[in-house]
Image: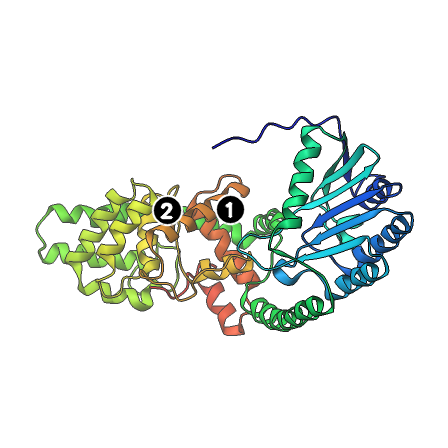
Amino acid sequence: MSRQPRLRVEPATLIANDAPEDHAKAIAEIIADADEIMIAVAFLKLGGADFLAPKLSKRLKAGAVVELFIGTDFYLTQPSALERLLELKNQHPACKVSVADKASATFHPKAYLTRRGNSYRTLIGSANLTQGGLKSNDELSMCVTHTKGDDFTRALLDTFNRYRVGKRFQDIDPLVLQQYASRHEINERERKKFEKARDAALPAGFDLRVIEAWYARYLADPQAVSDLAERKQRRSEALKVQRRIAALKDGRLDQASRIAFQDGLRDLMTSKGGRHLWGSGDIHRRGTEALSHPKPMIELFASAQAAAQRPPREGYEMIRKLADPIPGVGLNMATEILCNFAPDRYAIYNGNTVGALGALGIAAPQFANFQAIGPARYEGLCATIKALGARLGGANFSESDAFLNWLYWKTKKAKPHDQRAASSRHGTAGGDLG
C-alpha cells in the first residue's frame, strides 16, 4: 500500500478565541479578497450562517466562486442555518451548498480554504460555524499561506474534490432541507425527553476540585478527628482478632474453637456481646447468621489473609467465591475483612460508600452483591478510592472509608432518626449490604 507523502507546511499563524485574532476575524480576513472559497464544517448553526452569509454574498457579487460542505451528524446543524445558506445559493448561481447524508463515519472537518490568484490561505482546526466556534469556545486552529502546485495545496484540493464527487453529499434544495428539518425536529423532541430522564437518573454533579475543601472541613470536625483516631485503634485490634480466627484453621474444630470463633466474630461486627471493631455499623443485621457457620467462616478468614497479599482483582475473586455461599456474609463483610488485612490494597464497599461516591458524581450499584460487583468492577472501585486517597494526602483505604462515611452523612438528606443512628455509632455506620 502506497503511503501519502509527508506534507511540509510553511510557518503558520495560530488562531485561538482568547487572542485578539479570534476565529471570526481570521475567517473574515481570508475571505475578504478571495476569488474562490471552499468550506467544510461538521456543524453549522444560525449564528455561524448569519456571520458568514453577508461576507460570502459580497464576494459572490464580486465574481467569486463559493462551495460549502456541511455535516449533519448528531443533528447539531440547525435547519434555520441551512435555510439561510439556501437563500444565498438561490441568489447566486456561483454558490454551491451540499449537506452530508448520515454514514458510518462522522463528517467532522473544520476547514476554510480560499484562493486569490495563485495564492491560497487556509484555516484548519477545531472551529465549526457556530457562535461558540467563532468567538467564545476554547478553539485552536492554524492559518496557513500556501501556493498553487505545492503538496499541501494539492492534498487540500484533492480532499474537497473527494467531497464533491462522493455519493455522501446532496446539493441543498427545499426538499433536502425539509427532509433534514423533519428529522431534526423529531431528534430534538426525543433528545429533550432523554436529557430529562438522564438528568433525573444521574447522580448530582460534583466539582472534584472541592474535595480538598470537604476534607478540610472533615479535619476541622472534632468528632471526625476523634472518630478517626478511634477507628485506627479499633482497626489494629480488629486485625489481631482476624488473625486469631484465621489461625483456627490449623487446629481441630472443637467446642473451644467454636467459642473462640464466635467471640472473635462478635468482637468484629457487633456491640451486642462484642466490641464492634469493624467500621461498618450494620454488618450485624445479617452477619449474625454467620456465627452458626464456623468452619466455612474460619476458612474465609484464613483465605482472606492470603488473598489480601494479591492484587485486588485476584484476591477479591478468591474471597467472593468462598464468601457468597455462607449465610450472613455479603460484600460489606468480605471487603471489611480484606481491608483490615491489607488497608493499602483493598477498599471497603458498603451502603455508605455507595452514597458518598454518589455525592461525588460517581454512580455505583446501590443494592450491590457479589454477582453485581465482579472482580473487574471491584478493582475499578479500589482504583477510584485510591485516587481519592491521593487527594487526601495518601490516606489508606481504611482512612478513606472514614472520610467517605463522614461525607455520606454530611450530604445525605437523612431523616432525624437516621442522624441519631449515625451519631450513636461514632459516625461509622456502614450501610446494609451485609
Mark 1 burial class by Cα count in 10 Å: few <14, some 14-19, many 20+: many
The tally of labels here is: 2
In x, y percent, where is residue 317? 28, 51
Dot placed on the residue nearer the N-terminal end, 1 or 2: 2
Residue 264 seen in the figure: no
- Observer-nearest of 316 and 434: 316
Assess disc 2: are there few (<14), some (14-19) or many (≥20) residues with their C-alpha within 10 Å of its C-alpha: many
Q: Residue at x 82, y 52 (%)?
A: 94
Q: Residue 334's spot in the image, x, y percent?
A: 30, 55
Q: On the rendered structure, is 103 left or right of 432?
A: right
Return the residue nearer the eye: 340 or 28.
28
Say which element carries label 2.
loop
Three-letter code for the amino acid on which mark 2 is drawn = Tyr
Q: With respect to residue 81, does 250 lie above or below?
A: above
Which mark is on residue 388?
Answer: 1
Q: Amino acid at mark 1?
A: Leu
State the quadrant of the C terminus: bottom left
Q: Secondary structure at mark 1?
A: helix
Give x and y (percent) for residue 256.
12, 55
> Is mark 1 in CB contact (under 8 Å) with mark 2?
no
The image shows residue 279, relative to residue 144, as above or below, that is below
User: Between 385 and 29, which is closer to the camera in this rendering?
Assistant: 29
Q: Quadrant of residue 271?
A: bottom left
Query: Which label was assigned to residue 346?
Result: 2
Q: Residue at x 47, y 52 (%)?
A: 402
Q: Is residue 199 left or right of residue 235?
A: right
Q: Considering only vertical position in the picture, is 383 above or below 358?
A: above
Which colour style is shown? rainbow
